[in-house]
Image (cartoon, grey):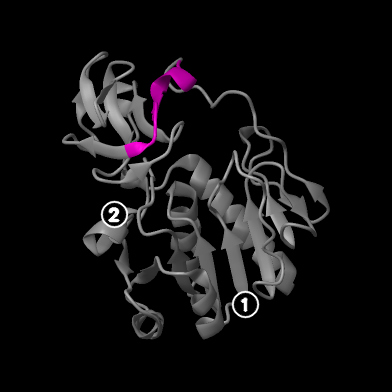
Amino acid sequence: MAVVVRGIGDVGSAVAHQFFLEGYAVVIHDVPTPTTTRRGMAFADAVFDGSAILDNVHAVRAHDLPRIREALESRRAIPVYVRDIGPLLAEIRPRILVDARMRKHDEPEVQRGLAELTVALGPSLIAGRHADVVVETSWDLLGTIITAGASMPLAGEPRELGGHARDRYVYAPSDGIFRTKVRIGDPVRQGQGIAEIGPMTLAAPLDGVLRGLTRDGVPVTRQTKVIEVDLRGAAAEVRGIGERPRRIADAVLAAIRQHRGRP
């Protein structure tokens, strides 16, 4: 059974990872230059490097539809496709489509009709309108499967880590090309220059390690999240599937089984 997951961030990657282990033929779709920050917790670097590994599962960039077919038949890795989604949907005719792009500040996009069953993740999504099923991604009701009604609106502040919330992040001050020479997992000090967008230097907001860092050379727009610091020292979580993405992925799989009448 073919599944298309839209979004190669940590949530979309966790969903695709779960489906792959369950034996589904899964494809990840995203744009050619994703601004994903938590690249150690996602398959995002497959877009740039051609392949990536997340918790012992491989993903490979497929440059065309024949390579998608080849990857789905071999089941050795998850293919990643970054061209227009229309031809992809027409070629593989997925039974399931999961929108895991987590487009928090954009107008919700209607996914219904793109597959036999559509599942959408994120705030302010209406089951039966934007998708057949919605899965709650807010920590308050994380993983709730919604078949009627809407998911919670976007909360004001992210969840705290080590006593810090939004101040752990750096957002692009303007449109431009994100440039950096540091790497995910590097230790940083508050005020240390981490990246540049045009003439502007972006500094580490706090002491810690880099949990999130947009890929060098990626175009970003103003207010895009580009840097995240984890302050928890040895307990810092920078690689592998995190708790929230895993719980969301579990809920998506449960929603699919519920739809198909499986326990």
Q: Element at badge 1? A: loop
Q: Is residue 60 left or right of residue 116?
A: left
What are the residue bounds of the magenta stretch?
Answer: 164-176
Per the image, the residue denoted by label 1 is 95
Callouts 1 and 2 close, C-beta under 8 Å: no
Distance from the alpha carbon under mark 1 to that under mark 2: 27 Å
How far from the left and from the top, in percent, is residue 44? 34, 54
Q: Element at badge 2? A: helix
Which amino acid, by three-letter code, is at mark 2? Answer: Asp
Per the image, the residue denoted by label 2 is 45
Mark 2 nearby-residue class (10 Å; few <14, some 14–19, many ≥20): many
Q: Kindly identify the residue that appears in the image at 65 percent across and 33 percent down.
A: 154
Q: Kindly identify the residue that appears in the image at 21 percent across and 35 percent down.
A: 180
Above or below 179: residue 67:
below
Q: How many marks?
A: 2
Which amino acid, by three-letter code, is at mark 1? Answer: Arg
